[in-house]
Amino acid sequence: VLTVRQQRVASHVGRLTLHVDSRARPRPRPGYALEELDGELVVYHPATEAIFFCNATAALIFRMCDGARDVAQISAELAAHYPDAAQRIAADVESTLSRLIEHGALEWS
Amino acid sequence: VVVTRVEVAFAGTKLAVEYAGLVAERLVTLLLSRVERAPAELATKVTLTLTDDALLEDGVHVVRGADLGLLAEHLQERIAYHFADGCHEGLVVHAGAVAKDGRALLLPAQSGSGKSTLTTWLSTRGYQHMGDELVHVSARDSVLQGWMRPLGIKHGSLEVIAPHLSRPSSSDTWLDTPMGAIVSPALFSPVPSAQSALAAAIVFPRFERGRPEVSMRALSPADVSARLLQCVLNARHLPAHGLTDVAALCRRVPGHELVYGSFETLEGRLAGLVT
């Protein structure tokens, strides 16, 4: 889901899952540049040189992190749109958010 | 002392190299004979001075010592830095590139990924060598221009590529260095080098010693963009730090991840990308 500029950091991607509070409201950290290609995202922060690749699922979750929705709302909206995947959506959201936060793309509002 | 001056350019940046002495002359011939000569109207970014036992940059010592390989590596490093730093239009990518029939493969990679090894091997197989370190990419029209330095092959890569090269008796085309060797493409490439060509595909190579099979998989444009952005060296000079240009390129040019442990079957997999 994610790649970052420093390979040593990338080696940790996917291994760590931080605790995510379902009432917390994630939002993008200021200063990020975004580019959408075929429904996927490249997220780049010039100051930290962090580069994130978000596949279509991660891009959708990232787009919903507007500082107004909390984690539970994001999961609920996605589950309503994708009922077939509802069972695993909360875990996917939590995992994706923890990685984006871990690497500094998101912060809590 | 007779001082000779050559002015070389890459991606709109001009550097002057002044040298004196027979040893320095031999080094400059190996390193710079194929690099584009600079037009007079360009301003000189920096002057590098090479003697038989020192390298200076605008009069300040970079390195002292009579080790030719060491001087060569430092000279290459300073040239690469200034060529990348001086470019404010288009992308300067840490990459190799080869071309066939005017269509090029861009091979971006971090150091140690096997970029020079693959570039060298492809050059022995009928591809035109374009460069193995810096490639300028015009995001507007996808044209690649390589820095036409000789190949820099590290010790680990030399073991892999050595069976495909025959080492010459003279040092005009081969120079041992602390990190490996600097080798002129004229030594092994049956076709002349190409200065520029249209990008046909972007391939991210990774050499894995002992891997029996070749793996190549197509990447999505966003995945290619994220990987390519990691290899852009002049990002700080570009609007949106190069992200807009990278994305524009990756919308037009397909990208692949290549993992290989030997050259067998590799040629056929790559040939389809440039036809």
Image (spheres, grey):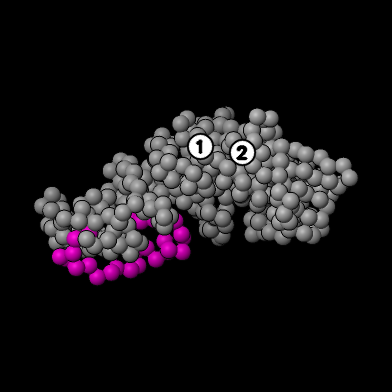
- At x 46%, y 31%, the residue is B140
Residue at mark 2: chain: B
User: Which quadrant, please, contains the N terminus of chain B?
Assistant: top right
Whether tag 2 and tag 1 are in contact, CB under 8 A, the answer is: no
Label 2 CA crowd tier, 10 Å (few <14, some 14–19, many 20+): many
> Is tag 2's residue or tag 1's residue first in the polypeptide sequence?
2
Residue A95 coordinates in the image, percent (x, y): 26, 63
Residue A28 sits in quarter: bottom left
Q: Is residue A13 magenta?
A: yes
The residue labelled by disc 1 is B89
Residue A13 coordinates in the image, percent (x, y): 37, 63
Residue B159 sits in quarter: bottom right
- Please state which of residues B230 and B52 is positioned toward the viewer in this rendering: B52
Residue B67 sits in quarter: bottom right
| Residue B13 numbered tag | 2
Position of A72 with respect to A6 (left or right) is left
The magenta segment: A1-26
